[in-house]
């Protein structure tokens, strides 16, 4: 298909300059081929190269073109499924290991930013805000779990008067504040990881879709028990990569390149708007502590300030796959429910993109064969988890797979209904949860 520019987002408009990387038009050899130029792929490539592997990274469009360069950019502890569900799925000990990895993911972001001098506007602080009394009870239960069960000391409860001194809105009645989580400019972070990977020796090809892959021992359509463990050939439009190992980090954009993976995630469209610059005083009146904020509804609102003091607000999702509403107007309307004082403020950017959900909202890591790894299913918690996932897969390839294998144990089902019915079924389920939000 060829290289596509980034969508017209605030992030693209404020991104640092990046080199134009060529498309692959020949055959190349490497130790590891990474497919996907988001945070997970760039992190995997970087950590592999730092361990001495020769690495080729293929990106269908441009580095950070997908969710990594478009998201709400909130780096948060834990996983979207929550610890209680994880314990039911894999047991308490393994669930604790997943939690520890998520916290390490936050530390890794800060380490990579410092070590590679990545200019991406990192800010400490995240608030999970309660709208209803039910939410408030859930916050206290969560805080008890974080502090007493998980030993997580950076979170505290914020009562209603303090919330309203920090956020210029009457919408929220309490919050959980985490000083260890935070937010950043996601596209500049991803571009910084790619630049660090290139300095470590990674060869990056943009405008290059991985159209399919096969092992030298036979077709990837064969059962895993009869597939070999030789080299992998990754086919592109005008070339081929021959690799000893393959890491698939394309998420919803892998599509028919890996149908068995595509069946276990659902692409959901999310939308964000960015206001005009508000100025320092007005911006800090909105969010006095400059934290990232999200509420506790199933269809949630989330927002934060940018480095140039715009409000970035996300508050719409589309499960149907149809562009059936006026995205800027609908998202702006949600913003004004939180901050009605912004009624006269211009919206200067509006954009959307797809994130990947799993059925159980837990991340989906694993192997298609002994030398073919995949990372997907971050379900809205990708900013922190994708980077540490890339490091874990690099460690697994290097021979230390214990923590990667904890994630690989999480069971995942395909979305029901096949290609024709899976999305309508999800829309019906989401209607139920939206009704719950109203109660």
Image (cartoon, rainbow, N blue to C red):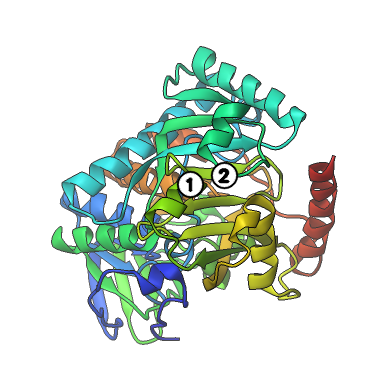
**Picture mark count:** 2
Residue 61 at x, y percent in the picture: 40, 77
Residue 226 visible (yes or no): yes
What residue appears at the point 29 percent right and 39 percent down from the top-left corner?
Answer: 399
Secondary element at tag 1: helix
Task: Residue at the far top: name it.
Answer: 148
Viewer-side residue, 112 vs 97:
112
Residue 392 at x, y percent in the picture: 35, 42
| Image position of 18 with respect to 202: above or below | below
* Quadrant of image for the C terminus: top right
* Label 1 packing within 10 angstroms: few (<14), some (14-19), many (20+): some
Q: Are marks 1 and 2 in contact (CB under 8 Å)?
A: yes
Q: Which of the 4 quarters of the picture holds residue 200?
A: bottom left
Viewer-side residue, 281 vs 308:
281
Drawn side of residue 433 relative to residue 168, left or right = right
Q: Which of the 4 quarters of the picture holds residue 230?
A: bottom left
Viewer-side residue, 302 vs 368:
302
Disc number for residue 168: 2
| Image position of 182 with respect to 30: above or below | above
Residue 82 at x, y percent in the picture: 60, 33
| Residue pointed to by mark 1 | 285
Residue 126 at x, y percent in the picture: 47, 38
| Image position of 100 with respect to 325: above or below | above
What residue appears at the point 53 percent right and 44 percent down from the top-left corner?
Answer: 293
Disc number for residue 151: none
Residue 231 visible (yes or no): no
* Quadrant of image for the N terminus: bottom left
Which callout, 1 or 2, points at the residue further toward the start of the chain?
2
Secondary element at tag 2: loop
Disc 1/disc 2 C-alpha distance (Å): 6 Å
């Amino acid at each position: 298909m060829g290289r596509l520019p980034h969508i017209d987002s605030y992030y693209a408009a404020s991104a640092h300059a990046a080199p134009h990387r060529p498309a692959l038009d020949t055959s190349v050899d490497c130790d590891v081929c990474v497919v996907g130029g988001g945070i997970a792929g760039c992190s995997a490539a970087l950590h592999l190269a730092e361990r001495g592997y020769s690495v080729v990274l293929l990106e269908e469009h441009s580095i950070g073109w997908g969710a990594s360069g478009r998201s709400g950019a909130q780096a948060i502890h834990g996983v979207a499924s929550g610890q209680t569900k994880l314990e039911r799925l894999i047991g308490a000990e393994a669930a604790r290991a997943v939690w520890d990895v998520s916290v390490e993911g936050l530390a890794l972001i800060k380490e990579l930013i410092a070590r590679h001098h990545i200019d991406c506007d990192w800010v400490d602080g995240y608030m999970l805000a309660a709208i209803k009394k039910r939410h408030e009870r859930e916050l206290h239960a969560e805080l008890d779990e974080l502090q007493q069960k998980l030993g997580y000391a950076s979170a505290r409860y914020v009562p209603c008067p303090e919330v309203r001194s920090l956020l210029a809105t009457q919408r929220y009645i309490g919050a959980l504040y985490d000083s260890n989580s935070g937010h950043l400019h996601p596209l500049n972070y991803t571009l910084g990881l790619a630049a660090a990977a290139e300095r470590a020796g990674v060869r990056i090809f943009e405008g290059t879709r991985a159209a399919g892959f096969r092992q030298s021992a036979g077709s990837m359509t064969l059962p895993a028990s009869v597939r070999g463990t030789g080299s992998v050939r990754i086919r592109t439009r005008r070339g081929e990569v021959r690799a000893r190992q393959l890491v698939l980090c394309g998420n919803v954009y892998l599509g028919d390149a890996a149908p068995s993976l595509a069946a276990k995630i659902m692409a959901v469209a999310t939308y964000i708007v960015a206001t005009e610059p508000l100025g320092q005083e007005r911006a800090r009146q909105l969010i006095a502590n400059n934290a990232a904020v999200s509420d506790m509804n199933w269809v949630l609102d989330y927002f934060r300030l940018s480095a140039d003091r715009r409000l970035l607000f996300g508050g719409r999702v589309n499960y149907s796959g149809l562009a059936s509403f006026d995205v800027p107007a609908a998202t702006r309307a949600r913003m004004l429910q939180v901050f009605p004082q912004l009624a006269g403020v211009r919206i200067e950017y509006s954009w959307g993109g797809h994130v990947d959900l799993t059925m159980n909202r837990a991340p989906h890591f694993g192997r298609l064969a002994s030398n073919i790894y995949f990372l997907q299913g971050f379900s809205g918690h990708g900013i922190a988890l994708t980077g540490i996932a890339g490091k874990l897969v690099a460690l697994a390839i290097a021979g230390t797979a214990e923590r990667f294998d904890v994630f690989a144990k999480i069971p995942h089902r395909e979305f029901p209904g096949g290609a024709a019915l899976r999305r309508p079924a999800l829309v019906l389920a989401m209607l139920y949860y939206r009704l719950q939000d109203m109660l």
